Structures are given as C-alpha cells and as structure tokens.
Amino acid sequence: MICRGSAAVVAILLFVSLPALFALTVRQEGRVTLPAGVSVSPPPGRANFSAVVSRNAGFLATNFNDNVVRVWALPSGKLVHTLDTTADPATKLHLSDDGRLLAIAYKSWTIKVWDVASWKVQQEFATSSGVRVLAISPDNHLLVFATDHDKQIWELPTQTRLVVLHTPFDCYCLMYLAFSPDDTMLASTDGDTAIRIYDAHTGTLRSTASDLLLESLALDFSSDSKSLFVGGPDQSISVIDVLTGKLRDTMPKQSGTVRGLVASGDGKQIAGIYNLPKRFDDASISVVLLWDLGTRSVRARFEQPGIAVLGGAFAGGRFLLVGGSGDKLSIWSLQ
Amino acid sequence: MFTRRAILRKCLALGSLTVASSSSAETMFAAFQDREKQLRKPTPPNSLGPFYKRLAPTTATLRAPGDPGLPLSLSGQVLDTRGDVLPDATIEIWQTDHFGYYDLDGYRYRGKLPVDASGQYKIETVMPGHYPDLSRLCQHVHYLVTAPGHKTLVTELYFATDPAFEGDPQKNFTRDPGVHTPELIRPVVLAGEPEAIHAAVTFELCLERL
C-alpha cells in the first residue's frame, strides 16, 4: 500500500509539474468575475453556450447561461458590449478574424451581423432552420452557416446568396466550418467523417479528405492555405493536403479529444485545445498544447486544475487563451 | 365535403388520373386508398455524435463472453414508408460499453450487417452504460441505416427503462436534451432465469425513398 501510495504521489507531482516543464512562460493577463449566477461552465442541457475569440486576439464574445451576449476586449478582459437576448436567445456566435464583425445566430432562425465598433446590426438573414455553426471569411466578404439540411454561403456586402451545399443526410450532425486565410476555400465536416473542401465562392468541391476514421471536431487552415489541420476524438491532430485531400501527417496522440485548433500566422505553430477526459463537452477540463510544426514536438503546455479553455489566438509571438471555472473568466498568455 | 373516392373520380374525369389496369376504376380506387393507408412515418433522425468510426467490422455479435453488463438482443425490420421490406439494407450500430465508454482505438461495440431477405436484423450486444461524466444523457445505441434508393437514416435507440425517464418516457423524454422525440424510446423485454437474465428490444426502422 505504501509503495502504491508513494508512486501515486510521485505521479501526481509529475502531472502537476508538467506545465512548468513544458511552458516557456504562462502569464495571467486578466481575470473577470461574472455576474451572480453566470457560469463559464454550461449547465446540463445548455446547448446555446458559446465562446469565440477573434483571430487577431482583440476580442472575445461569449454567450453563457443567462441569455446575454457579451463582448470583451482582450487581453484586458474589459467588458465592451452586452446584448440581452432573452426575448430571442442567441444560439451560436462567430467573431470575424479582425474582430470587427460579430455574427449571432438566434433561436428564431435569424442571423444578425453586428458591427462591433458601432454596436449596430449591419445585416440580417433568415435561415430555413436552426443554425448549427457559422463563420465569416477573413476578408469579411462571405458568411457561411450550416443547418441540419444544408450549408449556405452568402456575400455579406450585397447580402446575396451564392451557394447552397446539401449535407449527405439529415442527422443533427456536429458541424464545423473554416475559411482558408486566402478567402478562396471553405472546409467543412458533414457528419460522415469526411472533410470536404469547397471553392468558397462557387461551392465547387475541390477535394475530399476521406482517410479519417472518426469525426473531426476542430478545423483550421495553415497560414499559406495549403494544409488543413483537423482533430477530434482520435486525440491527435492530422494534417491534410488541401489540394488532394490526402492525409499528410499526424501529430503524436494525446489523452484528450481535440476541441479546438488555431494555426499561427507565421506557419510555425499550431495550438491544440484538448478536453479531458475523452469527452466532448464544451466545458470539460482542458489542456492546451502549442506544437512546433517544424519539429512535430510540443513547445508549450497549459493546464490548470479545473479550468476549461474556451478559445485562443496567436498575437505578437504569444498565444492568448481564455478559459475559466465557475464564475471566473481568465485570460492567460502562453509564450 | 368530398370523399377521397369522389375526388379520385373527378380526377379520372378531368384526365389528371389515368387507370392503366384491367381492373375496374372502383377496384383501383380501393387499392389506391388501401395503399395510402399503409404509409408509415419514417423513423425520426437523431445525432450521429462525435464517436462514429468508419470501417466497422461486419458482425452481428458485439458482445464477447464474460463482458460486463446486461446482455441485450436488438432486433427489428427495415421497411420503407409504404411498408415494403428493404432486403438490401445495411445496418451499422455503435454504442458505449457497460461503463459508458466508446472504444475509439478499436471496434468494440461497433459493427455493421446486412439485413436478411425479409429485412430483419438481430444484434447481440450489452445494454450500453451512461456516459460517466454526463449522466444526464440517456443510454443509447446509434444506428446508421442505408438502402439503395432510400435516404440514409442516422438515428438513436433509447430504452424506456432508463432511470432518466422515471418510468414515464412519454412525459420525461426531454430530460435528456438529445432525445428529440419519444418515438425513439423502446420498451425492454427481460427474459431468462435470474442467473442468466437478458434483455431484448425491438426497433423497427423506416426509411424514406429518394
């Protein structure tokens, strides 16, 4: 018993000290206490929980358990805007890469695109059913949203529908979408483990990645738009050749479902957000690994007891990540 | 108020319906009505979930000797909305083990099989467990059903005995946010001696034509 106990203590010490071993620097940039009753962790049955970080690391948009959409400035954590959506609850959020636009899908089957600076609705769209996921292209020119039945690509300035892409079957699928940094491609999961890469303006299928055995729950393109990073319950990050759809590489497997991927703008790193244990809740305990794409090795690791990571973005040579526990929302930088 | 028969007669008179049969129009009207009555409601779809894994083995026996959990037989028939048997259908199922874990590395409790000539299937497995960290989600078995000329069906089977339903699935099915309709909840039949008890559930699957 003593031996087993000692071994357990050593194991715990090693586990606890792992962040210190791997992380170059972890710094807390901001900490916010949410209003009473508001929690970073979604309560049971709360499907509308959403938190997104703009790619430029300038803003965070959240929709916790009180039907209030909040926009926060990063890294300070200063609250910039609030929007009470009790009358028509928000279901999904997306911040444009530059943080200028916030797209909100509502329970009433509408999408409103808000100008973050003026906090006015810039455009409004009606959808044919509930929106599962939505995204804005890096140049703020295209909006894509997916329902259980189709995906639609709209041109934002003219509010013109460009393309309707039908899903393989009605399945209440978990869908994920990502535009390429050069705005030419849209990658999508469709519930059949394949990832399809479309021309973002015409909807023409460019390639299909069909080598994966399990669903992907996170997608992001490389900065040169030539590779697509994908991850999911197989607990690893795979690299797909965009041109051919073939699997090019797979990062060493970890112990946790990949729930978020963020590629750095310099093409050298990718941040993987892994949820522990092997579950898919949005607010499980998280580990963030920064992978060096050149050496395929972990160059930094973030893990704090009880903390769920909501998202992150690369900015100025560091990775800014947002997470929390209970009513505490925190911002850290990882370098 | 027109009867269905009267409407069909009018259609015939106006040329919007043609009877191309040696049988009388009245006989064909009766057959038409009978056939319409047989229309079945397609099985409601449900989530594919993130744990579907491609290339599952072809097998009807997912349970291995000594596996923990209540042995469970799943059976049923695959039909279309007109009640026609679909003998070319293929069923793929996946579920957690008794403890609520999916096998992501291998293919335990995953399998696919063709139905027989009468559209019947039977699978030997165990009662799936609740997700250990998401006990609010009910025990379920995922189905992916394909048949040439028909819409692929992705759905889930739930069990009326699940504690979440407190014995009244019609009333309490919404306690699991993933259960969109009580139509996917099936009664459980217990059989065998106490020392060798096993459960059986019948789940008929109805596909829509393309």
Image: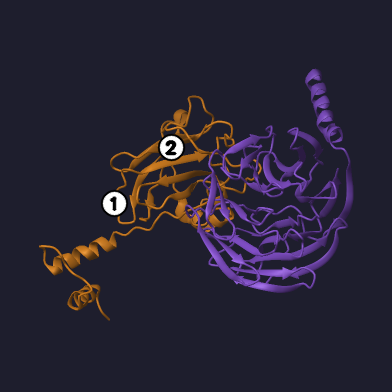
Q: Is residue B204 above or below residue A301?
A: below
Quadrant hosting residue B198: top left
**Residue occupying the far bottom of the picture:** B1
**Along the polypeptide, which appears first: circle 2 or circle 1?**
1
Looking at this view, is B92 or A254 the one in front? A254
As drawn, is A265 to the left or to the right of B203?
Answer: right
Chain that is purple in the image: A
Looking at this view, is B144 or A318 the one in front? A318
Q: Residue at x 11, y 63 (%)?
A: B23
* Image coordinates for residue A118, horizontal then vertical, percent: 79, 73
Chain that is orange in the image: B
* Image coordinates for residue B62, horizontal then vertical, percent: 46, 32
Three-letter amino acid code of the residue under disc 2: Lys
- Residue A204: mark in rendering: none
Q: Residue at x 66, y 37 (%)?
A: A235
As drawn, is B23 to the left or to the right of A122?
Answer: left
Q: What element does badge 1 sit on? A: loop
Q: Residue at x 69, y 32 (%)?
A: A252
- Residue B112: mark in rendering: 2
